[in-house]
Amino acid sequence: MMDIKENISLAKHTTFKIGGPAKYFCIARNKEDLIKAVKKAKELKMTFFILGKGSNVLASDKGYNGLVIKIENCKLKIENCNIHAEAGVKLEDIVKLSDKKSLTGMEWAAGIPGTVGGAVYGNTQAFDVKMSDIIKSVEIFDTKTLKIKNLLKKKCQFLAKKSIFKKNKNLIILSAILNLKKGNRKEIKKEIEERLNYRKKNHPWRFPSAGSVFVNKTGGPPSAHLIEKCGLKGTKVGGAKVSEKHAGFIVNTGKAKA
């Protein structure tokens, strides 16, 4: 049974470490809990917000005057080269599992602190690879019709860091099927290690952030390069700063506000 709590700090549930209290807060550990919480909020005419690991969220210092539903549905299984992952599964867990099973296609995500739900929602990308490149289908719950549906990849309207889920907030991601390929485990391990080392060397892990937040234009220079050329590296407003290590990151130096 879900435990609904009151006045829970959102700063503790986002990677920016910023945010006031949620009036109500609950954790959905399976899709049944998630659907039940949404239906209850609608019944009470209460606003609600679906939260994953909070790695792409900037919560207001004023908090949230409604119900925040944190998803932790984490079932994960493999069928041939398909990975069936619920929305709350961490990307790092899929990277580890695909490595163990010698499946290639997820190496790019090594070191990304997000979940499957968030990665599908925002079509997470890194090293010229997008989440949509490996998605076969997405299971969703439609809060308008209160029905569960399965959308094939072409119905998800993926673009750079965009999807149908960003446009239609009534579509809540429950799970996804990822289609990988058989690979050489030695090569997979090597690429994972390279991605992790790159992030450790080039990303500002000492400070809370939401990762690299800007969209790169296809065929053009990286957005971080353009920001650096404008002389904005190290620019600070209050406790928020454009990272001196990687200009694509805005970091919380300790007392950033929202």
Image (cartoon, grey):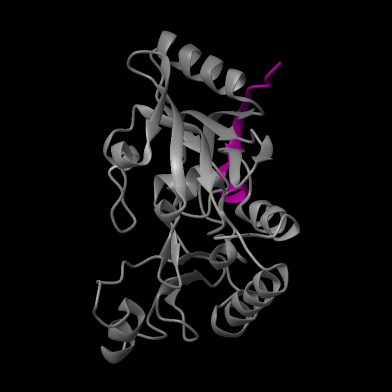
* Residue 40, percent from left and from top: 50, 12
What residue occupies the far top of the structure in this picture?
43
Determine the residue positioned at 38% across, 86% down: 233
Q: Is residue 42 above or below residue 181?
A: above
Residue in the image at 64% along x and 33% along y:
73
Instruction: Check the picture and name the quadrant holding the N terminus.
Output: top right
> Quarter-wise, where is residue 249 in the image?
bottom left
| In magenta stretch: residue 3 | yes
**Residue 246: percent from the left, percent from the top?**
46, 82
- Report the residue at 41% width, 55% height from top: 133
Observer able to see residue 149: yes
Can residue 180 be found in the magenta stretch? no
Query: Residue 122 location in percent, x, y?
Result: 39, 50
The residue at the point 28 percent across, 54 percent down is: 159
Q: How many marks?
A: 0
Q: Is residue 102 left or right of residue 163?
A: right
Which percent across, then down, holds residue 118?
Answer: 48, 47
Over which residues does the magenta segment extend?
1-13
State which quarter of the image contains the C terminus: bottom left
Whether 35 is drawn above or below 65: the answer is above
Q: Is residue 80 left or right of residue 251?
A: right
Q: Is residue 60 above or below residue 112?
A: above
The reply to whether residue 61 is in sight is no
